[in-house]
Amino acid sequence: MSLLVPESDLPEDLSTPEVVEAAYSTDLEAMAADLGRSLPVLVECDKDLVPFVFMSVRSRLRQRELQCLFLDGRPREGEENPMNPGFMGTMLAQLRNAVRGSIEQKVVVLPHLDLLVTSSGGLTAEAREVIPLLYENPELVWLGFKDPSFPLPAVIENLFPHRYSLLGIPRDRLPRLVTRHEARKFGQDFNPWALYKYVSGMNAARLRRLLETVEGEDYPADPAPAYAQIRAATSGGQLEVPNVDLETQVGGYTKVKQRLRSEILDVLQRKDEQSDPAEIARLEELIPRGMIFWGPPGTGKTLFAKAMATAIGAAITIVSGPELKSRWVGESEENLRQIFHRARQSAPSIIVFDELDSFAAARGTYTGSGVEHSMVNQLLTEMDGFHSEELVFVVGTTNFVEVLDPALLRPGRFEFHLHVPYPAADDRRAILAIYNEKMGLGMTEDTLDYTVKRTSLPVEGQAAGTLFSGDHLNALCRALARIRLRENLTGPTEPEHVERALSEWIDRPKLTAKEERVVATHEAGHAVVSLFCEHATPIARISIQGDSAGALGFVRHEPSPHQYVLTRGECLDRVCILMGGREAELLLLDDLSVGSAHDVSMATDIARSMVEDFGMGGEKVGTLRFHRDDGRPGRHLALSNPQLEAIDEAIHDIVETERRRCANVLAEHRSLLEMLRDELLDKKVIDAKALASLVPSKQERIEEAVKSPDRERIEPGPPDGLPG
């Protein structure tokens, strides 16, 4: 079966009533049948469709010898009231006359039920008078029309046992709604399925008006301009039609792009290439309509949604989760209804809920007014109402996927989960290359290499563990552009410019010469000990500038290549390195600062975990786990005093043994310690390349950090480097 429709099979001419009849004939016939059996009917449709639906139903009811009374609030002949009660007053008077003056069965049409409710779904003052009238005369049969943008209270909806929804256009009816002249604007062979992609959310009356306005030559070689006119009209000026190319304007993230293409974009493309309706319907069932894009802030989750919209020619609306909330009852749910209604009318479209977790956290965990519970229910209702042939997608972006309501994450709703992590080295290089060209920065390959390497470390001056995201790289490149503009630079951007852009304006603590000497000694101690610990990762950067949040100095290590396995040797080396700052102060200054407090605390915690959690306490305590997991107060299970003493002794032995090992390393390499301290006092910062030249005996080990621009970074959470 071909999707193409011969021109001879299309109607020569169509009026709006004929189009409405052709689009909804099955539903119109069912409505008339229900009304003929004295069953009230509620029709959900757009306002501009109401008159035509009424005319079609009325013509059918006349064949059944049923009269219709259309109460639209306009004064009829002989009903003029000198008091001028207004629209609602006139409609109420008409309704009152119909209910209390009628003794014969007739169909009363209520085209403006939405005027009886407030925007939050409550009842207006007029509605309180109308509702008793609706239930007063059993001889009347009601035909009500509901605007999809407004909810109806249960007391009104309960009046209508039979309900019909005329939202959008049935795909199989579209060939009957296009004239021959209009079809010629879309090429030699008319494919209604291709047109349906852009008009699925329109009603038949609006489609008729739109098709009459399409301009262009007949049988064009490229029908794209005609489809562009349709796309511009259906977006309505309220939704953005983005232009973000997934390959050229989104840097790096090869794996993320590959998954998005293979799971979504390729399936949609294959659907568009099919000529068998059954195969198209099968493919449509495979496409997830709800998606979660999750990952740290600033990694480009919304940008990926825009790139997806560009690839499928979809309009996009980006909604901030907190902006949806309202203090008025029902208004938050109404905001959601309006968003989905506009998106369906503008299909193909993508709704992006930014910060989805702000209102869609697991139900039962709310601490606010509880409006979030209703919003989640409304969101689920709207998503469950999608038809498989509608190209409307919902994307939720979040930094905290673990807190989302499980009902949202099940298959059939937000079933496609796309992780957008912090960019790795290759990703950062690709992102920097895009900004380099876009902003005209003139970064050389050496500068790019340095920047990629430099941004493998956490962002200085921000919360510990904050890694460089796409937004951070954008901010870095804009800072470079400002430096070039401020200093009128025309040559290439050098690594020193990058360093200035990263750290020039960080608010650093002002240390005295004595304080600086203590900090330099402390950090040099950490660095020297780590050079002689087998399991320590290479040093990436040593600083005494106070450019790491909450620290006067630091030794930053490369992340461990082992993300999931931690050995006893690695734990012991970490304790040993943590003792390095303290023991260096004792060795060179013959005194101690309180700067070692955090190091000692971390070392104690590691040793305690080894003994109590990991069964690494030795023979005295045995291979046991002592940590309480049952949620009851207290850290330990019920233990005897001798057992508790043995645990404390094992923890003390681990820390003390590693402290002595650390002291021995520093005593043996005192000259290296002093040299590294003096270099820090002079240069303030030592990177991996400079460190390799200072310690040639460890050059091969240090060069691991120089050669490798990045290892796979672990996120979220702090970097794997040990604090100073």
Image: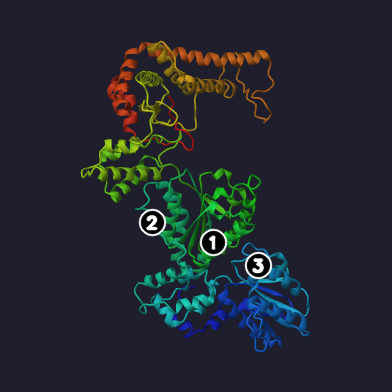
| Circle 2 Cα neighbour tier, 10 Å, few/some/many (<14 / 14–19 / ≥20) | some
| Circle 3 Cα neighbour tier, 10 Å, few/some/many (<14 / 14–19 / ≥20) | some
Check whether the beta carbons of the residues at disc 1 and disc 3 lie within 8 A of each other: no
Q: Mark 1 points at which residue?
A: 339
Q: Distance between the residues labelled 2 and 3?
A: 41 Å
Residue at 32% over, 21% down: 681
Residue 74 screen position, x and y as percent: 62, 82
Amino acid carrying label 3: it is: Val
Residue 536 screen position, x and y as percent: 41, 24
Please indicate whether residue 379 sits to the left or right of residue 712 in the image: right
Please indicate whether residue 308 sits to the left or right of residue 390 in the image: left
Amino acid carrying label 1: it is: Ile
Looking at the figure, which quarter contains the C terminus?
Answer: top left
Q: Name the residue under label 3.
A: 117
Badge 1 marks a residue whose secondary structure is: helix
Front in this rendered view, residue 123 or 556: 123
Which residue extends farthest front?
Answer: 83
> Quick check: can you spot residue 144?
yes
Amino acid carrying label 2: it is: Val
Q: Name the residue under label 2.
A: 244
Residue 588 higher or lower than 714, as above or below: above
Residue 112 screen position, x and y as percent: 63, 74
Q: Identify the mark nearer the N-term, 2 or 1.
A: 2
Residue 251 screen position, x and y as percent: 36, 48
Q: How far apart are marks 2 and 1 (CA)?
A: 23 Å
Please indicate whether residue 561 sits to the left or right of residue 671 in the image: right
Residue 130: quarter of image:
bottom right
